[in-house]
Amino acid sequence: MKKLAILVFLSFIFILPVDASTGSIDNVSHTALVCHDVSCATPTPGSINFKPTTGTTVVIDSVTGLTGQIWGNELGWIDLHPTGEGVTFANLTTGVLTGKAWSQVSGWINFAPTGEGVTINPSTGQFSGYAWTGGPEGGWIKFDCGNSTSCVKTSWRSSLSSGGGGSSGGGGYRDVCLNISGIQTSIPNGYTINIDGLCIPYVDMCPNIEGAQSSIPLGFSLDNIGACVPNIDYCPNLEGIQTVVPANYILNESGKCIVPKKDMCPNIPGTQDSASECRAIDLCKNINGIQGKIPEGYISDSNSCYPKEIDVCKNIDGNQITLPEGTIINEEGYCVEKLKDICPNIIGHQDHVPLGFTLMDNICVFISNDEDVSKSTSIPVVGFTFIPSKLQIPSNNTFLKYLTNGIAKNMGIKGDYKVDVISFWSLLIILLLIALKFIFWILRKIS
């Protein structure tokens, strides 16, 4: 009976908590920042809400540490006390935290990384310091109440004084793990409490799945952030289970993983298996690429393809994509037969022999004063083409020919030629009008 009394007394000493305080997150200050660079400004940092409107409410307890769920706009839901891990107090006197939380996006969040760490001030309840998480959305998680955007506060306060002893002393700490030598104020990392209340080593292969998984469950595998995900075989036609499409493979229309064929002719639409297909005849040279067949809605003409809607000669039956040979477009826009030029040696188009000329060997020659046609030669006339040949007055005047010599050369006329007097005087009048207009403009500027 005496021994039983002693055992009860000893149990009472070790089990009753001297510091069993708990607290909740402040209603105003409950946001931390996820910094993506040293300045924690650019790119825009992520945020973590320690007091979301949904999820399990966060509780800070001197024994169990931090429990509940918090929400990150980039990190998703974060479990502060996942199986086998959890954020707990390393020292209740100083409020230093240890352990890891679990993010559904970035994986483990370390609250005690090398060289840094997070502390809850045991007197004010303010969080301070840095936690760390990896992944594309990760970075240093900043707690600093010097800025309202990174300030998290709790109503938790430690009742232990700095003189109450350390974590290894007997200054009234509750020993969470009675079966482990020394006094543990929180569950050590890598341990869990079994149904008998003992702290035992624990490894959970799948921290994202409820319960303890000592091995990866059948039908699951670890992804790149250490989470257990169902095995989805992307390539059922290949041996084994492929959780992603293997390198150098693609999914075809039937959902099978195949090695894509090499396109031997990248300059030709589609995929060509052999180089011989690259020699396809281009039926539409006026269209980019090589067309082995006439594109839909097009018609072909002389190795060129044109839309069927194009009709140059609407007054002729069918689609004329080019001007038919021997035709011209008149002022009304109709395709009409092109009249024969009776005098091809004279500039312009003559539908009859001009006055003062005669037709000889299919060219128009000027008739000399002696009217000896046999001695006449083909003499071109320099003049405006819009002046009808019937109105032209060819002249062999040396002065006129001298003045129009440059024009004749520009027209490609060599040797002897006549000058159309009407065209010559028309040109002088036009030049005179231009000169007068210029003079009037100068006078207006001066005045």
Image (cartoon, rainbow, N blue to C red):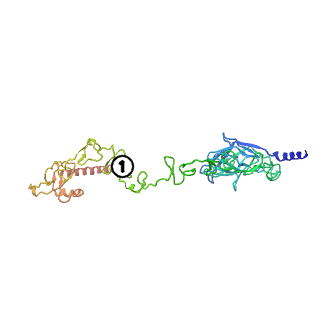
Is 11 on the left or on the right of 271, as rendered?
right
Picture coordinates of residue 445, whole percent (x, y): 34, 50
Judging depth in this view, the residue of 105 and 345 nearest the camera is: 105
Q: Nearer the viewer, residue 205 or 74?
A: 205
Residue at 32% across, 51% down: 303
Q: To which quarter of the image does residue 408 belong?
A: bottom left
Find numbered disc 1 in the image and state the secondary structure of the residue it sits on.
loop
Residue highlighted by disc 1:
293
What percent of the width, then of the height, locates residue 412?
Answer: 23, 57
Q: How crowded is mark 1: few (under 14 residues within 10 Å), some or many (20 or more)?
A: few
Question: Can residue 97 be seen from the camera position used here?
Answer: no
- Nearest the eye: 300 or 277: 277
Q: Quarter of the image containing the N terminus?
A: top right
Left or right: where does residue 246 sit relative to residue 284?
right
Visible in this render: residue 24?
yes
- Residue 177 is situated, as x and y percent measured from the top left of the image, at 78, 49
Rendered residue at 37%/54% (across/down)? 280
